[in-house]
Structures are given as structure tokens and as C-alpha cells.
Amino acid sequence: MWKFTLFWTLILYGLFHLGAVGIAVLMQGGKRLSSWKYLWLVPLIYALIAGFEAILAGTLVGLVFVPPVPVALPVSADHAPCHSVGATYLVGNFAMSTWIPFVWGWVNVLVLIVSSFRIQGGL
């Protein structure tokens, strides 16, 4: 499950950072040509930041540590004991949908968006 959570987080972070860099580049439309000299670095820097953030967030969410279960669960080839998001569902005897890593990728992106705003104190 870690792999799929990481992939979805990489894809979604990439899309959102691509949108942000697109807006940043379009805002330079009316500027002088000298400002376009280093503008090609902006998408590269955004891509590197998005990749680093996605690897960090996807790994942290995908490898959530679940303490060992005191009750022995049946072990099969599909459900090997592991410490991940999938293990959380195994502990509760729930069937894990294939959409769960996708949802966790969106949760990662939404946390990134919410954390980008400055928190104001009392007015």
C-alpha cells in the first residue's frame, strides 16, 4: 500500500504544483525580457520541491506504524503482516478498497493547501 499511496501523492502533488507554477509563469507575461532570463528555473524548482514533499508525505502516510496485533490474524499471500495503512484495515477486519491510497493522496494535498495559509490570531 505504501507504493500506491506514494504514487498517488506524487501525481497529485505534481498536478497542483504544475498549476501553481503555471500561474507564476503567466503572471510574468507583461514583464521585461530580463525577468524571463531565469524564469525557466521556476518550473524546475517547483518540480523538485513537489517531488521532495510528495515522497516525504506519501512515505509517512503509507508507512504508518501499526503496533503488532495481540490476536493472531490469518496470514495469506494477499495479506502478509505489515506495518502500513493496509495493516490498519487488517487490524479492524475491514476489507481495504483500492481507492484508499488515492484518498490518502488527496488528504496529503489538502493538508499541504491548508498549511500554506497563515493562521491569524484573534482580530
Image (cartoon, grey):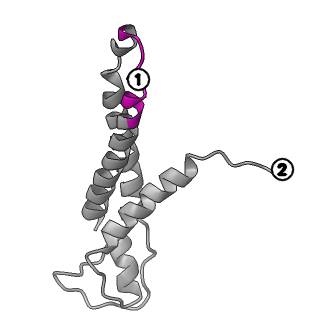
Residue 32 image position (x, y, % from top left)? 40, 11
Q: Callout 1: 10 Å neighbours few (<14), some, many (20+)?
A: few
The residue positioned 35% from the left and 89% from the top of the image is 94
Q: Is residue 29 magenta?
A: yes
Left or right: 3, with 118 as reference point: left
The residue positioned 49% from the left and 51% from the top of the image is 112
Image quarter of the N terminus: bottom left
Q: Is residue 25 visible?
A: yes
Q: Is residue 27 magenta?
A: yes
The residue positioned 37% from the left and 48% from the top of the image is 16
Residue 105 image position (x, y, % from top left)? 36, 61
The residue positioned 33% from the left and 75% from the top of the image is 86
Residue type at numbered disc 1 = Gln
Say which residue label 2 marks. 123
Residue 28 image position (x, y, % from top left)? 41, 23
Quadrant hosting residue 82: bottom left
Residue 37 image position (x, y, % from top left)? 33, 11
Report the Cα–Cα distance between label 1 and label 2: 34 Å
Most extreme residue toward the front is 30
Say which residue label 1 marks. 28
Quadrant hosting residue 71: bottom left
Q: Secondary structure at mark 1?
A: loop
In the rendered structure, which segment of residues is drawn in magenta? 23-33
Quadrant hosting residue 80: bottom left
Note whether 23 is above or below 60 in the view shown: above
Note whether 93 is above or below 89 in the view shown: below
Left or right: 56, with 4 as reference point: right
In this view, the residue in front, 110 or 98, is 110
Q: Which mark is residue 115?
A: none
Note whether 118 is above or below 30 in the view shown: below
